[in-house]
Image (tube, grey):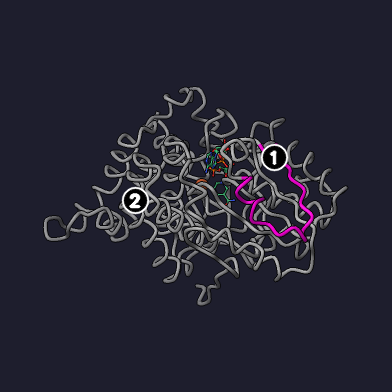
Amino acid sequence: MKTVWHFNTAPSVFVGRDSIKKLNQLMNKFNGTKILIVTDPGIKNAGILDKVLEVIDSKYEVKVYDEVLPEPPIDKALECYEIAKNFDPEVIIGLGGGSSIDLAKVVSVLHTYGGHPRDYFGENKVPGPVVPLIAIPTTAGTGSEVTPVSVLTDVENDVKMGISDTNIIPKVAILDPMLSIGLPPYVTATSGIDALSHAIESYTTIDYRYLKAQGEVIFQGSSSLTDHIALGAIQKIAKNLHKAVLQGTNVEAREEMLLASLMAGMAFANAGNAAAHALAYPIGGIVKSPHGEVTGLLLPYVMEYNVNVVPEKMAEVSKAFGLSEQHYSTEELAAEAPKIVLQLLEEIGLPSKLSQIGIKAEHIDQIAEKGLQQERLMRNNPRTPSVASLKELLNKAL
Ligand SMILES: NC(=O)c1ccc[n+]([C@@H]2O[C@H](COP(=O)([O-])OP(=O)(O)OC[C@H]3O[C@@H](n4cnc5c(N)ncnc54)[C@H](O)[C@@H]3O)[C@@H](O)[C@H]2O)c1
Ligand SMILES: [Fe+2]
């Protein structure tokens, strides 16, 4: 049994309206004047790139790569790497949702150590520190601004692949709600439910003392610190996700969602995600759905799958959504938790069945088998998974 856990996160986090104006001050922390900004066409067209360029002091030389695609394919990382080779940046900024921040992370690795993204897929494959990263999230979100994770799509093999290494945690995260008020309702819903998946999966993940893994692992299972942060994130999402979807310009709701996404990222960066994220990897290779659409859809079914193993924590999830222990027993509260999340999906306009996103009965076997192979995620699931029980879970979700 383990007796020690550790906690990694971004060393500097700035939160609040107009916090983007702190960017020059933060740049002074780094020895360098050449900045590469990695972003996507949606961010540029929404005027967000201009807002960031406007605040950067003229003493800095800035190069922009604005061709990131959602769920970024490996090719885009290679394309951006070519630009980095010629420009030789001293700081890399990831500006956008998880897709842009994740691509900035991979490029920082390639620019520092060379090679191909495939050389770094897996855990602890980055040899050491990378070009400093600043993350400016515009979705809420993946939490990528504080996580040791970067996810790319391997188009040739129809599968999403991840780099997990604490060397790629950004040095600075800036969370300015004014950059997310124009986020369209559907992306607000998919990215917000992804944050809820991170919070609930890391809250209910296996206790760090009982995680069966060899050596130093990044995703250690839940500790008292990750539990507090994850539950705090769940409470914030319960209060603010509807508001952010329905009233996009509500700055307070946007800020609370950014904070919730940050907290959920801090929790899963250390405790780890579990079965919903593991099963989302093979599904993301079969259909081109946004990541949050898939993890959010799977979440209530995975909660139902796990509920009897972690009833007290599931009861806390229901309480975070406003159910009172005066009216229900712990078992009743726990049983309500998956139903609350299912209802939330419907209320914010997200699919709640795999068939709605193009998954067919014939895909179930391969999803269960490939999902189980996502060892770093599945080993953290509180209920020990098997192909047979995962197939049952997936058939309920079909
Ligand atoms: N690194 C991690 O820890 C981590 C965690 C979870 C998910 N992910 C990955 O992150 C990616 C998903 O990221 P995401 O959900 O943040 O979405 P995204 O980055 O894919 O963006 C989705 C769309 O929203 C647009 N957009 C983003 N912000 C906007 C704004 N403020 N205004 C207008 N349009 C805006 C973008 O242009 C894009 O078209 C997936 O590849 C997923 O696998 C990474
Ligand atoms: Fe996620």
| Amino acid type, residue under disc 1 in the picture | Asp
* 53 displayed left or right of 355: right
Residue positioned 47% across, 53% down in the render = 177
Q: Is residue 360 left or right of residue 105?
A: left
Q: Position of residue 253 (x, y in %)?
A: 37, 51
Please indicate whether residue 94 sits to the left or right of residue 252 in the image: right
Residue visible at 58% across and 57% down in the picture: 145
- Residue 105 appears at what percent x and percent y? 69, 52
Q: Secondary structure at mark 1?
A: loop
User: Image height check: is 13 above or below 102?
Assistant: below
- Residue extending farthest to the right is 86
Label 2 beta carbon within 8 A of ligand 1:
no
Q: Nearer the viewer, mark 2 or mark 1?
A: 1
8 w.r.t. 244: above or below:
below
Residue 55 among those drawn in magenta:
yes
Can you give x and y, in whole percent of width and height, for residue 326 in the image? Answer: 12, 60
* The C terminus - image quarter: top left
- Depth check: give the residue in front, 121 or 379: 121
Residue 53, above or below 339:
below
Q: Which mark is residue 240?
A: 2
- Is residue 79 magenta-colored? no
Q: Which residues are the magenta region?
A: 49-68
Q: What kind of residue is marked 2?
A: Asn
Q: Which mark is residue 66?
A: 1
Say which residue appears at 30% left-offset and 52% top-offset. Answer: 239
Residue 191 screen position, x and y as percent = 47, 43
The label on residue 43 is none
What's the distance in space between the residues labelled 2 and 1, CA to CA? 30 Å
Q: Crowdedness of circle 1 by 10 Å Cα count: few (<14), some, many (20+)?
A: some
